[in-house]
Image (spheres, grey):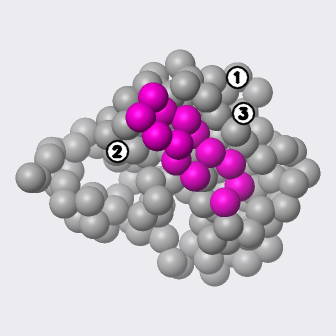
Amino acid sequence: MEVVMTEIPDDVLCTSDHLWVRPGNGHRVRLGFTSVLLDRWGAVESLSLPDDGEQVVCGDCCGDVEFSARTWEIVSPVTGEVVAVNPAIGSEEVEADPWGDGWLFDVRMSDPEQLDELLDPDEYLASMGEVPLE
């Protein structure tokens, strides 16, 4: 079944694991959940995120989100050091504004070329069998 999605910001890249990555200054990126993940699994019950200063490795689990029906692992799309964790993060922020105030954490990447492996918004939607609103 094809689903029509709301607009995805054009300044993000996405992963097949339903994270968005917003490049910032230098090698810093901000990560969050896509609305696709939240729409599919419903209300967020709890979050477990990496700590400020923690090293994350591309392809490794660095946290999880619990929904009523299942737990979803957060798989890091980049390698580097966590340099900020959203201090106001909670289920309400994640659900209300997943592309903005509901961001999860920032990473200072050790290998910026890892961004080349991520999907642009149209590629992400196509991989989900969804189309953006025109």
Q: Is residue 112 left or right of residue 7?
A: right
Secondary structure that dominates the magenta span: strand
Amino acid at the residue labelled 1: Ala
Labels 2 & 3 near each other (Cβ < 8 A): no
Marks 2 and 1, the one that precedes in the sequence: 2
- Closer to the camera, 35 or 13? 35
Q: Amino acid at mark 3?
A: Asn
Whether residue 106 appears in magenta in the rendering, the answer is: no
Query: What kind of element bears circle 1?
Result: loop
Residue 68 in the magenta stretch? The answer is: yes
SS at circle 2: helix
Q: Quadrant of residue 57?
A: bottom right
Q: Give the crowd class for mark 2: few <14, some 14-19, many >=20 residues within 10 Å.
A: some
Disc 2 to disc 1, how far (Cα)? 22 Å
Of the two numbered discs 2 and 3 in the rendering, the one whose residue sits closer to the viewer: 2
Q: Quadrant of residue 131?
A: bottom left
Q: Disc 2 versus disc 3: distance between alpha carbons?
A: 21 Å
Magenta range is 61-73
Outermost residue, front direction?
A: 69
Identity of the amino acid at label 2?
A: Val
Whole-angstrom CA distance, mark 3 to mark 1, is: 6 Å
* Residue 134 versus residue 107 in the image, above or below: above
Q: Which residue is mark 1?
A: 88
With respect to residue 14, does 111 lie above or below?
below
Q: Earlier in the sequence, mark 2 or mark 3?
A: 2
Residue picked out by circle 2: 36
Q: Residue 96's x, y, as percent?
A: 45, 22
Can you tell which mark lies on residue 86? 3
Q: Position of residue 81 (x, y in %)?
A: 83, 60
Q: Are marks 3 and 1 in contact (CB under 8 Å)?
A: yes
Question: Is residue 31 among the parts visible in the rendering?
Answer: yes
| Mark 1, other Cα within 10 Å: few <14 / some 14–19 / many ≥20 | few
